[in-house]
Image (cartoon, helix red, strand yellow):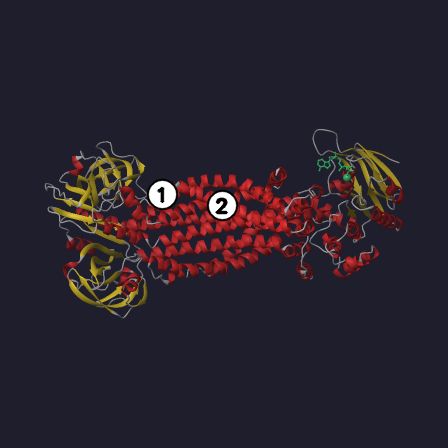
Amino acid sequence: MTDLIRLSAVSKRYEQTGPPALDGVDLTVAAGEAVAVMGPSGSGKSTLLNLVAGLDRPTSGDVEVAGTALTRLSEKALARFRRSGIGIVFQFFHLIDDLTARDNVLVPADLAGTGRRAARARATELLESLGLAGRAGAYPAQLSGGERQRVAIARALINRPPLLLADEPTGAVDAATGEQVAELLRELNRNGQTVLLVTHDADLAKRCATRTIEVRDGRVSGA
Amino acid sequence: MTAVWQAALAGARRRRSQSLVVFVVVLLSAATTLLAAALLIASDAPFDRAFTRQNGAHLNAVFAPSATVFDDPAVTAKAGPYPVVEATLSKGRQQRPPGVVAGRSEQSPAVDRLELTAGRWLTGPGQIVLSPITAGTTWKVGDRVTVRDVDVEVVGIASSVTATAAAWVWPGQTDVLGGAEQQLLYRLADPSVTPDLPGLTGSTRYQLVKLQVEGRLKPMVPFVVAFAVLGLVMSTLIVVNVVAGAVVAGYRVIGVRKALGFTPGQVVAAYAGQILLIAVPACVLGVAGGRLLSIPLLAGANTAYTVIAAPTVPWWADVLVLAGLTLLTGLAAAGPALRAGRLSATRAITVGRAPRGGHGFRIRRALAALPLPRPITFGLASPFTRPARTAVTMVAILLGVTTVVFAAGLSTSLTELAAAGNRVEQAPVLVAVVGRPPREEAVRALIEAQPKTAAVTAARETEARVPGSGLPLRIRAYDGDASWTGYPLLSGRWYAEPGEAVAGARLLSSFGVRVGDELTVDTPGGRTTVRIVGEAFSNGSTAVMIMDAAGLGGSLVWHGFEVSVTPGTDPHAYAETLNTALGEAGHAQVSADSQENEVVTAMLALIATLTLLLTAVAGLGVLNTVVLETRERVHEIGVLKTLGMTPGQVRLMVISSMLLIGAVGGALAVPLGRLLHAWSLPIMGEAAGLTLPPAVLAVYRPAELVALGAAGILLAAIGALLPAGWAARSRASTALRAE
Ligand SMILES: Nc1ncnc2c1ncn2[C@@H]1O[C@H](COP(=O)(O)OP(=O)(O)OP(=O)(O)O)[C@@H](O)[C@H]1O
Ligand SMILES: [Mg+2]
């Protein structure tokens, strides 16, 4: 098995003073794993995820994803990396208000320059498999929380990224929808999708993850 | 009510960039509005107002040196006698046309209270106070000037509404005032009746001065008023647009507030309060700034009007602007807030967040099919998905570019108007004849002897009346065919023989005659009938007729020589050579430097200032709307960045989203500005009693129009560039946290 994520001695400081958000983190995730990151609020989980996604840069240390050293990439190259290297799902969905569900799903394919026809076929397939076939033309404001999160997952998957990142994907939906999302993630992982999942929810971690790590005060303690 | 107050405060604080936008726009608009109001006030009957303020002289009488001065029950007040001489003032090589120098120690006697515009009043000999016209733009307080070979220091500049003198010296300055006549300035019980004055050598009735001043003034006033009105309307519209835009942008928050239990009334109060919290201090600062700016601007207007129209902005203008703009911004905020207040909480949230119709969807589809890079189609589509926000931006650009197009046209028209009226190209040199009695023929011989003289004609004038009509008219007469003097012909032809005349628009309309008609006039030399063969443009507002001097007899009053020079001759050099040859007999002046042209120059400077201000307000309106719009999209941009949009693509997207709005706004604004110009100019012309020559009306060239239209795109692009940069540089993770 190859390592998909490799973090070595990664620290992140937002402010000059005070404790760092992440403090000397070493972490490797192999392809095909589903790793749950747990820990109390403010411990640095989202920070860790953002670094892996190339949305932010570490203060020191190296982040390597799918053989690419992110710390050495320009902003432009990082953006390119995000297009096809990863898919991200957020707690608050972060859909684009002006776009329909289908068009939201299509955005990463558009940015990656995927052929229009192929991309549409893939989007339709994804929406169908997520039970959203009838809601493709709706705007985010017209969707329920669970529907929005499923659109976000479809969007994260459209470019078939080797790595799926999820930050509290069930944090803003009800229990039943949370169930659905958990099931979906487990299904994806079973089919070979590598997943890095940030959550508070021990139950969710237990159900979806092949491994759980704990972040506390910016330090990782493996499990 | 504390919840409402807190909401207002929090809103103003949280949306800091938006608050800044409203602040700056309201501030600039308040300043512009105050300036516009100041100009309107200054343009309202400036002569009459100055005449009242200064207790101007109804009659300016000059008596022989030893005559007993006239006193009569018809006189209600008088000033003088003051010793007066006719003299030429010079500073180095600069020489002014001959004028009256009066010996006078009082600045504010009962009649003709002089208003100082610079420096101070006389305190003793060795000093001189100049009239603004004598001072012009080049002679300043502290300069030394020569009058009758005596060297004196300029200590002040003072204005007399009826121009009782070109300069004043201390009465004890006998070396200047040697051989003086006596000047008396009278207020009369009935100014229309001129008393019979024994021992009089010359007199000027204020009616004539008023006619001359207003003749120069009237054509200008409608233009200035148009600019002032434009300033008022545009800044008002821009404020309304920006404020309403700010409230529309806050719809989602309004929805949240309603969900928290705000009543519609409280929503309106919170929003109007939030805007007023910013607008009131902005208004106060703007009015203060406008007051500061009005000092040079009013000075310009005063020079342009040749009388001191308004010394300062009256205090009630401040109050009016403050109250008006505050009310306006309050209403502009309350309107959309009321609409939002009436919506159900969830509807307000939805309206704020999602497009309503399916247009955006279809247009986005259509655009996506275009073979363009994705960020560009994203950018181009975004205006359609948010019609309300797009409308706000579009209106800002439309207003901005329309203002610029209209203002540019207006100022070109005025330049053309001035050029058409003053004939500085065709008759570049004017020669006055000095001395008593004037040696006209000697001066003419000297002018004709100059090798670079191309043509010379005497210009003479007389007053005339049409039998049965009370309206006076002015006849300007030249030697033979003087068509080279360059009056723009609007219709018909130039006169070809004595008995034919070319008329100005005011004459035609006043007496109801047309080109081809005959008109009988009574001149001091007798009754004569002339045929009007053409209409010429003249920028004065009195009825005027131009014709051959032959046949009008001895009733004509000497006016001066008009001279044209051979091609390639510098008029200044020519005038200087001629002045050396003329000596004491006369004085040559370049007509472009004449007082009348200084008036035009001052007017153009005034309009340039206003154009600049208006353009700044309009540009800021656009810039701020665009910045705001992009700021509103920071979250969306953050999302796109997490999905793999590069900084370059972000820039491209933001700019292309504005380009479309800018292009459409610019394309609409150009014809709109033109239309406004085409519609309003004849109205201004009519107000001034002028038929405008084509050169004044057709001022837009296609290339200019394209450039002006492109200005809209440019404004939008520049406005977008700034926030596009922030957006491109910002970390996606930060942008997402902002939600
Ligand atoms: N952009 C930022 N600027 C400043 N401080 C930040 C920023 N992002 C995170 N922090 C700080 O870093 C620390 C870790 O934040 P992070 O968001 O990673 O926590 P978390 O574990 O995801 O918490 P939660 O479970 O509540 O989401 C916190 O103290 C947070 O306040
Ligand atoms: Mg978090």
Instruction: Indicate the amino acid at tag 2.
Output: Leu
Mark 2 chain: B
Please tell me if label 1 and label 2 are on a single chain. Answer: yes
Foreground residue among B342 and A200: B342
Q: Quadrant of residue A67?
A: top right
Q: CA distance from mark 1 to mark 2?
A: 26 Å
The percent coordinates of residue B111 (x first, y second) are 23, 41
Indicate if the residue with disc 2 has its beta carbon within 8 Å of ligand 1: no
Q: Which residue is denoted by mark 2 in the rendering?
A: B325
From this view, report whether residue A44 is shown above or below residue B213. Answer: above
Q: Is residue B415 left or right of residue B724?
A: left
The percent coordinates of residue B40 (x first, y second) are 39, 48
Instruction: Indicate the amino acid at tag 1.
Output: Ala
Q: Element at badge 2?
A: helix
**Does residue B450 appear in this view?**
no
Give the residue drawn at x 27%, y 42%.
B54
Residue B299: mark in rendering: 1
Mark 1 chain: B
